[in-house]
Amino acid sequence: MAEGAKIGKEKEAQWLAQRLLEAKHFSENKIIIHNTETGPKEIGETCIYLYTKESFWYKLLNSLLRNYQTITREQVKTVGPFCWLLERYTVGNMNDVLTVYRGLTVTDEERKNFMKGRVKFTAFTSTSRDRRLAEIFGNTLLIFDLDAKYLWDDSRNIQCAMDVSAISDFPNEEEFTIIPGQCFDVVRHEFDDNTKKYIIYLKVTNYAV
């Protein structure tokens, strides 16, 4: 609620907080010992649902994660627990998917940063399995190739995204959420004269930036 009050979104923040409070009882008598545990399903699904709603919350969340160097201690307390629950549940329920898409608006300078060879997404990244849906948004289309193997186990595909379409506030968008911290190699880029969009092809990698 504190973060919502700062930007005049008190009612929206109250509604979001109430949804979390309603799910809180599912954590009673639940102690998470290992960092690999996801926590109660009901709480994880509530976090995903609230994250996918059109509100100030997901915008604030991702803005802080993209600019993590400037996060304050207060924001760690107000936003940190939600981020942790969302990340844990997403990591614990990732799916195999080969290709996903994301449409967004970027400046020329931001587009140049994509061309540096390898990029790291520090925020949660919403993508879609439906290219046509992704092409509706922005002036740039990102095409994520997730068909790659782990370096330490070439029998397994790298998993870095969860199918949240059944939990999302927008189920028709066929959303896959990519976890924070995932790195991608820029394979190539082009300009599509038909759609008048830049297209950037990315492939998931084990290596860090």
Image: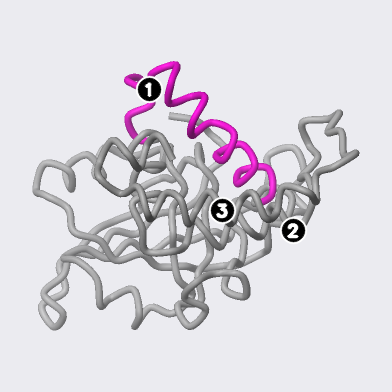
Tell me the residue that label 1 is attached to: 71
The magenta-colored residue range is: 66-89
Viewer-nearest of labels 2 and 3?
A: 3
Sequence-wise, the earlier of marks 2 and 1 is 2
Measured as percent of width and height from the top left, residue 82 is found at 57, 40
Tell me the residue that label 2 is attached to: 42
Q: Secondary structure at mark 3?
A: helix
Q: Residue at x 49, y 34 (%)?
A: 79
Amino acid type shown at disc 2: Glu
Distance in Å between CA atoms under marks 1 and 3: 25 Å
Sequence-wise, the earlier of marks 2 and 3 is 3
Tell me the residue that label 3 is attached to: 18
Viewer-side residue, 127 vs 141:
127
Quadrant of image for the N terminus: top left
Quadrant of image for the C terminus: top left
Q: Residue at x 49, y 24 (%)?
A: 76
Whether residue 67 appears in magenta in the rendering, the answer is: yes
Viewer-nearest of labels 2 and 1?
A: 2
Q: Residue at x 90, y 39 (%)?
A: 29
